[in-house]
Amino acid sequence: MHVIGDVTDKNVIMVDDMIDTAGSITKGAEVLRELGAGDIYVCCTHPVFSPPATERLEKSCIKEVLTTNTIPFNPEVQGECSKVRVMSVASLLGEAIVRIHENLSVSILFHS
């Protein structure tokens, strides 16, 4: 695994499209910590979280995992993890449907 740039004493945000078993993301976080990174945050779109993902995340040096509800996160099935925070995409998808129906721009939703 290669890290480009100096992460010493810097907080890091790791971004991934999906986390399945959390092996790669937790190993990447370990490398960053070994290189002197401060707090390590993770963002992902799809929380598959197959076992042992939540156990790995809970034991890892990752401070927080921010994800969406594109795949339901069920702690009873996938395991408890105090580091996971789920954000809803319902309003974004709802607005996109309305805009498509009314023949309006959808790309405007992704511009600041």
Image (cartoon, helix red, strand yellow):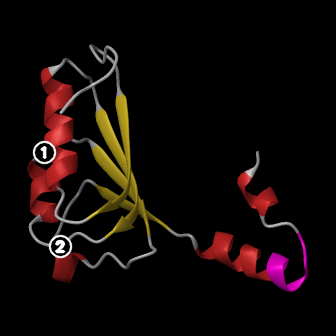
| Residue bounds of the magenta highlight | 99-104
Q: What residue would you read off at disc 2?
A: 50
- Residue 103 within the magenta-colored segment of the rendering: yes
| Callout 1–callout 2 Cβ contact below 8 Å | no
Q: Quadrant of residue 67?
A: bottom left
Disc 1 to disc 2, C-alpha distance? 16 Å
Q: Is residue 46 above or below residue 34?
A: below
Who comes first in sequence, dot 1 or dot 2?
2
Question: Label 1 belongs to which residue?
Answer: 60
Residue at the image position 39 percent from the left and 77 percent from the top = 71
Can you give x and y, in whole percent of width and height, for residue 100 in the image? 81, 79
Q: Quadrant of residue 94?
A: bottom right
Q: Amino acid at mark 1?
A: Ser
- Quadrant containing the C terminus is top right
Q: Is residue 73 left or right of residue 100?
A: left
Residue farthest toward the front in the current orientation of the protein: 2
> Callout 2, which amino acid?
Ser
| Local secondary structure at mark 1 | loop
Task: Name the residue nearer the viewer: 38 or 15.
Answer: 15
- Is residue 54 toward the left or the right of residue 10 in the image? left
Q: Is residue 90 magenta?
A: no
Q: Is residue 76 above or below residue 41?
A: below
Instruction: Give the quadrant of the N terminus.
Output: top left
Q: Secondary structure at mark 2?
A: loop
Relative side of 96 to 74, left or right: right
